[in-house]
Image (cartoon, grey):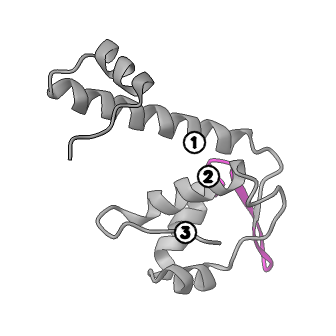
């Protein structure tokens, strides 16, 4: 699994979100086996406890399931991963709009600029 971690942000939610993204982008299919906690931790250079927490969070959300003695697998129902990603997108858009509004640009002006494909100032 190819995951890029921003070390300035909490790692557990990043792993959680990126696994969901990989599922909806068909990089992970239902019933695909995930890397072991240890292998995944080594791959991205984090403590195995961090991956364990991420997997447990994903399992609690019904995105993955565990088979004792075998490992972690992608759940059959990927709609949960889609919902999680949709909520994440909406949250990021809302945060972006709030930041833009602080600069004195309302939603209508923002929409116009986006539709024009306006470039940033250089």
Of the two numbered discs 3 and 1 on the same chain, state the one appearing first in sequence: 3
Quadrant assignment, res 19: bottom right
Q: Which residue is mark 2?
A: 21
Asked if the residues shown at circle 2 and circle 1 are in contact, with their CB atoms under 8 angstroms apart, the answer is yes
Q: Position of residue 40 (x, y in %)?
A: 59, 79
Answer few, some or many: residues within 10 Å of disc 2's Cα (few below 14, many 20 plus, some between 14 and 19): some
Q: Earlier in the sequence, mark 3 or mark 2?
A: 3
The disc label shown at residue 8, or none? none
Residue 118 drawn in magenta: no
Going 29% across and 65% down the picture, which residue do you hit?
8
Residue drawn at x 78%, y 53% as measured from the top left: 75
- Residue identified by numbered label 1: 85
The local secondary structure at tag 3 comes to loop
- Could you say which disc has been placed on residue 3 in the image? 3
Where does the image place residue 86, in percent across and percent down from the top left?
Answer: 57, 35
Q: From mark 3 to mark 2, how far is it between C-alphas?
A: 10 Å
Q: CA distance from mark 3 to mark 1?
A: 16 Å
Q: Which residues are magenta?
A: 59-72
The percent coordinates of residue 70 (x first, y second) are 80, 78
């Amino acid at each position: 699994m190819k995951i890029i971690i921003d070390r300035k942000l909490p790692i557990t939610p990043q792993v959680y979100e990126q696994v969901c993204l990989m599922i909806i982008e068909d990089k992970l299919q239902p019933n695909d086996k995930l890397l072991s906690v240890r292998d995944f931790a080594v791959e991205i250079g984090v403590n195995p406890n961090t991956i364990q927490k991420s997997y447990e969070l994903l399992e609690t959300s019904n995105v993955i399931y565990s088979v004792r003695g075998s490992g972690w697998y992608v759940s059959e129902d990927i709609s949960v991963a889609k919902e999680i990603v949709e909520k994440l997108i909406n949250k990021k858009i809302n945060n972006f709009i709030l930041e833009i509004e602080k600069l004195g640009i309302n939603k209508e002006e923002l929409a116009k600029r986006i539709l024009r494909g306006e470039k940033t100032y250089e």
